[in-house]
């Protein structure tokens, strides 16, 4: 677990440390989170830990279960539902991004694709660049509420992949990103929306296949 730095907000530090331990798979799904134990490990009072736990419950990474706070354990239905939300929201994001397309965004996407070509056989790096590609598009939407919702969804998908299937990707990911970029560059919103929808559905199919659903 990470270390507390005194000048910074204690509850935010506790939140970030606990969140990262969940996302990194250091805490098992359904593992009980004991407020006093976490506070003792971090060397702080229970108040900031209580607030951190409250924030993580809002994020959906912790849940109340049988009177205890536990690490969220996703079901297959949860995975399907979260990908359905992602599909609709990212389809809207790419449409808005095309309306707001700038040379800077185009350059960021080009750089991302070039970097992705170099790591197609490296799962960790590929995961980071895949997330970056989608983040560039989402942030280019310039819709702060959409960005906020997708950030929460991105966090849950990251956790689901780590806790259920690991960092594996289907082989056409780079090709699909390249075709999606082409549609964005051509400002073909109809095609880009359709491709984004299909792209995320294929990602869901890949996850379900890995858990033998």
Image (tube, rainbow, N blue to C red):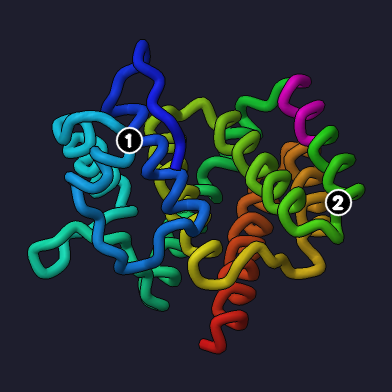
Q: Is residue 6 covered in magenta?
A: no
From the image, which quarter does the N terminus lie in?
top left
Q: x, y (%) of residue 178?
A: 83, 50
Q: Determine which quarter of the picture holds residue 36.
A: top left
Q: Range of the magenta residues?
A: 103-109
As helix, strand or loop, the secondary structure at mark 1 comes to: helix
Q: Does residue 55 appear in this view?
A: no
Q: Which secondary structure class fits the magenta region best?
A: helix
Foreground residue among 96 and 205: 205
Q: x, y (%) of residue 180?
A: 75, 50
As helix, strand or loop, the secondary structure at mark 2 comes to: loop
Foreground residue among 25 and 145: 25
**Mark 2 or 1, which is nearer the eye?**
1
In the picture, measured across the screen, residue 160 lies left or right of residue 168, that is left
The residue at 41%/77% (across/down) is: 76
The residue at 61%/30% (across/down) is: 99
Q: Are marks 2 and 1 in contact (CB under 8 Å)?
A: no
Q: Determine which quarter of the picture holds residue 62.
A: bottom left
Up the image or down, 46 lies above or below 212; here it is above
Q: Which mark is residue 108?
A: none
Write down the residue under mark 1. 42
Write down the residue under mark 2. 119
In the picture, measured across the screen, residue 41 lies left or right of residue 124, that is left
């Amino acid at each position: 677990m990470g270390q507390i730095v005194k000048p910074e907000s204690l509850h935010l530090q506790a939140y970030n440390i606990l969140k990262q331990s969940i996302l990194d798979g250091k805490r098992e799904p359904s593992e009980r989170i004991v407020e006093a134990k976490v506070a003792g490990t971090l060397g702080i009072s229970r108040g900031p830990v209580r607030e951190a736990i409250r924030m993580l419950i809002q994020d959906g990474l912790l849940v109340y279960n049988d009177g205890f706070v536990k690490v969220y354990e996703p079901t297959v239905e949860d995975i399907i539902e979260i990908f359905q939300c992602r599909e609709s929201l990212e389809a809207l994001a790419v449409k808005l991004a095309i309306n707001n397309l700038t040379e800077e965004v185009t350059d960021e996407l080009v750089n991302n694709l070039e970097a992705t070509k170099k790591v197609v056989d490296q799962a960790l790096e590929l995961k980071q660049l895949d997330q970056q590609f989608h983040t560039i598009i989402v942030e280019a939407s310039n819709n702060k509420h959409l960005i906020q919702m997708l950030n929460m969804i991105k966090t849950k998908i990251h956790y689901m992949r780590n806790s259920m299937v690991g960092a594996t990707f289907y082989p056409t990911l780079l090709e699909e990103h390249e075709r999606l970029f082409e549609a964005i560059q051509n400002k073909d919103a109809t095609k880009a929306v359709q491709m984004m929808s299909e792209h995320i559905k294929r990602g869901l199919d890949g996850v379900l296949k890995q858990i033998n659903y």
